[in-house]
């Protein structure tokens, strides 16, 4: 699925992935500036569609269990990755 999003988004430098506690995922390509390079896609492994709860609340971020960016090769340097990640996913308190 990630590779398909990258292939369909020529400006993509990576794909932001948000996993939810129901097993569904929200994904979208991001460009070198951290801006959207595709529409948000909701997906669930081995299912024909997303779950009922996600249909009701559009995959609320309150149910997020993990978030990351899958980088396209060649990956940007670490400082660029950090800058893009903060813009796309936000910063986490330490």
Image (cartoon, grey):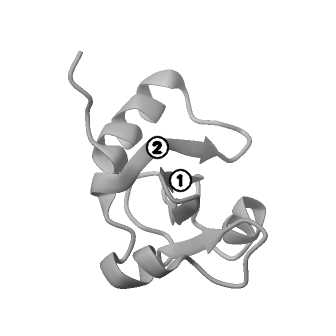
Residue closer to the observer: 73 or 27:
27
Q: Residue at x 39, y 42 (%)?
A: 84
Evaluate if marks 2 and 1 touch, with contact meaning CB atoms under 8 Å apart: yes
Q: Tell me the CA gap for discs 2 and 1.
A: 6 Å
> At which x and y percent is residue 18?
48, 53
Quadrant of the rendering where the C terminus is positioned: top left
Of pointers 2 and 1, the one earlier in the residue sequence: 1
Say few, some or many: other residues with alpha carbon within 10 Å of mark 2 (under 14 / 14 to 19 / 20 or more): some
Residue 6 in the figure: left or right of residue 15 = right
Quadrant of the rendering where the N terminus is positioned: bottom right
Residue 65 in the figure: left or right of residue 90 = right
Residue 73, quarter of picture? top right
Q: Residue at x 79, y 70 (%)?
A: 46
Q: Residue at x 40, y 30 (%)?
A: 82
Count of numbered circles in the view: 2
Q: Is residue 2 above or below residue 84?
A: below
Residue 63, quarter of picture? bottom left
Residue 91 in the figure: left or right of residue 76 = left
> At which x and y percent is residue 23?
58, 58
Q: Is residue 25 above or below residue 91?
A: below
Q: Secondary structure at mark 2?
A: strand
Residue that extends furthest to the top in the rendered view of this protein: 94
Q: Residue at x 31, y 38 (%)?
A: 86
Query: Residue under circle 1?
Result: 17
Image mark for residue 70: none
> At which x and y percent is residue 24?
56, 64
Residue closer to the observer: 34 or 51:
51
Query: Residue under circle 2?
Result: 67
């Amino acid at each position: 699925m990630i590779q398909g999003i990258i292939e369909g988004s020529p400006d993509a430098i990576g794909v932001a992935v948000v996993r939810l506690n129901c097993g569904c995922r929200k994904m979208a390509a991001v460009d070198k500036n951290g801006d959207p390079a595709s529409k948000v896609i909701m997906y669930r492994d081995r299912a024909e569609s997303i779950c009922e709860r996600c249909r009701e609340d559009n995959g609320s971020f309150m149910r997020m269990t993990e978030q990351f960016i899958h980088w396209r090769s060649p990956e940007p340097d670490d400082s660029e990755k950090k800058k893009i990640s903060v813009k796309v996913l936000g910063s986490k308190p330490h």
